[in-house]
Image (spheres, rainbow, N blue to C red):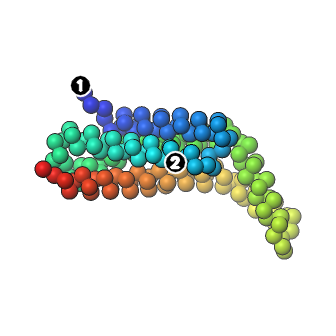
Amino acid sequence: MKSISARNKGLITGAVMILISIGIYLTKGNFENSLQYITYTVYVAGILWTLFTFKKETENNATFKQYFAEGFKCFIVVTLLMVLFTLTFLLLHPELKEQMAAMMREDIAKMKDITPLDVENKVATAKKAFIPSLVIGAVFGYLAIGSLISVIAAGFLSSQKK
């Protein structure tokens, strides 16, 4: 039986993460809850699945570099999928930007020594940066987690050679 490539494992992992994220949003109405940790758990599990399968395929003779490269192939695909999902989701739900603006307007209005014009200028700036900042956050967040898990697992697995 032919094994599943690291890229395909990344596609599977990313698809499961997207489905879980959609389920969380549909049940909770937002992503600001502890259920989101399920998504991150699936992400870590997908990378570990890739690396432990690779360990078996190489008969425990791979180097740190080879393990990390295999993990990279998986997590870069997941990152791409999650960034595309984040962007698509935000574009399909413009009300999220408006909700952020309303909350920000309310918070800034409570500050002393700030004019209504300053409040509106700050809100307008935040609205312009809303989608780019969340997409950039997704890119760096998923890359950081994927790199960290791959480095730790690659270090552990490569130190356990036969």
Label 1 Cα crowd, 10 Å radius (few <14 / some 14-19 / many 20+) = few
Q: Is residue 91 visible?
A: no
x and y percent of residue 64 in the render? 24, 54
Q: Label 2 to label 1, Cα distance in Å?
A: 33 Å
Vertical side of 139 occupied by 91: above or below: above
x and y percent of residue 83 in the render? 52, 44
Image point 20% across, 38% down: which residue? 57
Please tell me whether mark 2 sits on a helix, a strand or a loop: helix
x and y percent of residue 129 in the render? 66, 55
Q: Which residue is mark 2?
A: 37
Image point 53% across, 50% down: which residue? 138
Label 2 Cα crowd, 10 Å radius (few <14 / some 14-19 / many 20+) = few
Total labels: the figure holds: 2
Q: Is residue 72 visible?
A: yes
Do the residues under discs 2 and 1 have CB atoms within 8 angstroms? Answer: no
Image quadrant assignment for residue 53: top left
x and y percent of residue 90 in the render? 64, 42
Please tell me whether mark 1 sits on a helix, a strand or a loop: loop
Q: Residue furthest front?
A: 34
Front residue (pair 79, 103): 103
139 left or right, relative to 22: left
119 left or right, relative to 3: right
Q: Nearer the viewer, mark 2 or mark 1?
A: 2
27 left or right, relative to 109: left
Q: Amino acid at mark 1?
A: Met
Image quadrant assignment for residue 118: bottom right
152 left or right, relative to 110: left
Q: Residue furthest left?
A: 162
Q: Which residue is mark 1?
A: 1
Image point 79% across, 53% down: which residue? 102
Q: Amino acid at mark 2?
A: Tyr
Image point 71% across, 57% down: which residue? 126
